[in-house]
């Protein structure tokens, strides 16, 4: 056994993040991920964004729908402000380095680590875990491969991905220690702002999700202005007016969620929103929130449907992104093969 190696952060800053194209994008994806992806790009940091189609197939996906949803997600990214000239935007399966490194990480990660993942436990709770795909169990190793194939140092995500990013760090540390190298960075999660955990509009204790059976529970980025407005006006709340400070929202998850959504959409802090609406009834607050949401989301929805009229152009953008992604990931994964002792005689 080699000595544990200290791994100081001497890696250049690079952002990586991914979204599954397994359903339409939601307001949760927008506020927890996309909006923040755009901010990082606009700060001039190197940004790599991936539509993780290989993660999507860990549960059954209809092929035609998967293709359609991958294009729709790409359109959503561009409509929300991702500029394919400044960010690398591509779908995972076009860059084979992800699958290759994932296999190696399957051999680094331990069964026990995977078994402790709350997302795995949630997705198999009350169901027959024996019937889940092996890919669903190994999912976090593929996610670690996504990130580390680029030696990404920072990963903006929503709150629900925190544990997967801790596992990514564990895999990087174990790889570095096992092979006595300082090869992979210890990636930092970036979970910041009021929008990192957007809750269901029907139940403030449940995450807003594309897989919730109730469409009323979420805002889809494809919803038109009227639908967005109606969903917010009908969102579940209690009958109390808004309090004068955040403490007053402690046991009011539905109200707290709407205040957070308002804050994230308006680029304000939840404290500032409460200060503006202290004592207001939901009859006042909900229409204001609905109008704000429509103002922020409608331009994105419109641009998205416009982009979707030219699927060949979307495919071209994804292909070009994949070439640029491959140029970074290929040499990194080739070096991994060297480190672990694989003969690479075709690559001299
Ligand atoms: P997914 O749709 O599960 O692939 O998630 C893609 C990104 O969106 C991840 O960074 C998630 O953490 C984030 N995300 C998904 N749902 C929500 C939500 N309800 N609130 C905040 N972020 C979310
Ligand atoms: N698991 C993430 C989710 O469901 C998506 C994802 C896959 C991801 N690979 C990633 C996020 C790499 C960040 C970095 O939300």
Image (tube, rainbow, N blue to C red):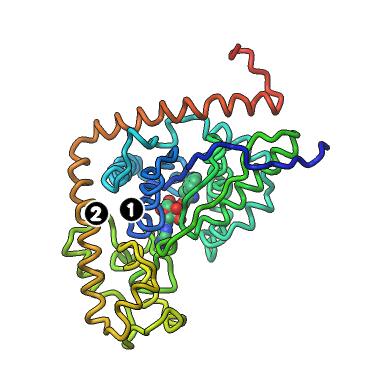
Residue at 39%, 52% in the rendered image = 36
Q: Residue at x 69, y 38 (%)?
A: 175
Q: Are marks 1 and 2 in contact (CB under 8 Å)?
A: yes
Q: At x 62% / y 44%, what residue is drawn?
A: 186
- Residue at disc 1, CB closer than 8 Å to ligand 1: yes
The answer to which of 273 and 56 lies nearer the viewer is 273
The residue at which mark 2 appears reads as 222
Would residue 41 be seen by someone viewing this image from the given angle? yes
48 vs 141, left or right, is left
Residue 58 visible, this angle: no
Task: Give the percent coordinates (x, y) of residue 70.
Answer: 34, 42
In this figure, which residue is indicated by the disc labeled 1? 25
**What separation in Å lies between label 1 and label 2 (alpha carbons)?**
8 Å
Mark 2 falls on what kind of element?
A: loop
Between 110 and 187, the residue placed more toward the observer is 187
Within 10 angstroms of label 1, few (less than 14), some, or many (20 or more) residues?
many
């Amino acid at each position: 056994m080699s000595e544990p190696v200290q791994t100081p952060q001497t890696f250049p800053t690079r952002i990586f993040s991914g979204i599954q194209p397994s359903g339409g994008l939601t307001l949760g994806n927008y506020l927890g991920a996309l909006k923040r992806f755009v901010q990082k790009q606009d700060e001039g940091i190197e940004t790599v964004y991936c539509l993780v189609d290989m993660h999507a197939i860990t549960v059954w996906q209809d092929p035609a729908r998967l293709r359609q949803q991958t294009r729709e997600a790409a359109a959503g990214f561009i409509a929300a402000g991702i500029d394919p000239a400044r960010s690398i935007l591509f779908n995972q399966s076009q860059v084979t380095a992800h699958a290759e490194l994932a296999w190696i990480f399957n051999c680094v990660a331990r069964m026990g680590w995977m078994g402790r993942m709350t997302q795995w436990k949630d997705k198999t709770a009350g169901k027959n875990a024996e019937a889940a795909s092996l890919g669903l169990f190994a999912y976090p190793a593929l996610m670690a491969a996504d990130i580390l194939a680029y030696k990404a140092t920072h990963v903006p995500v929503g709150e629900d991905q925190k544990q997967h990013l801790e596992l990514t760090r564990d895999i990087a540390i174990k790889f570095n220690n096992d092979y006595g190298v300082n090869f992979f960075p210890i990636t930092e999660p970036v979970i910041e702002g009021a929008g990192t955990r957007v809750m269901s509009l029907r139940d403030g204790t449940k995450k807003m999700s594309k897989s919730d059976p109730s469409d009323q529970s979420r805002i889809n980025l494809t919803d038109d202005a009227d639908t967005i407005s109606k969903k917010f006006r009908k969102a579940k709340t209690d009958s109390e007016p808004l309090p004068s400070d955040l403490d007053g929202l402690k046991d009011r998850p539905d109200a707290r969620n709407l205040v957070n959504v308002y804050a994230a959409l308006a680029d304000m802090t939840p404290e500032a929103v409460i200060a503006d609406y202290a004592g207001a009834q939901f009859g006042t607050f909900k229409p204001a929130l609905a109008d704000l949401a429509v103002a922020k989301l409608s331009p994105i929805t419109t641009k998205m449907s416009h982009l979707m009229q030219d699927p060949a152009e979307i495919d071209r953008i994804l292909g070009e992104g994949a070439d640029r992604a491959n140029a970074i990931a290929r040499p990194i994964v080739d070096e991994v093969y060297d480190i672990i002792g694989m003969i690479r005689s075709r690559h001299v």
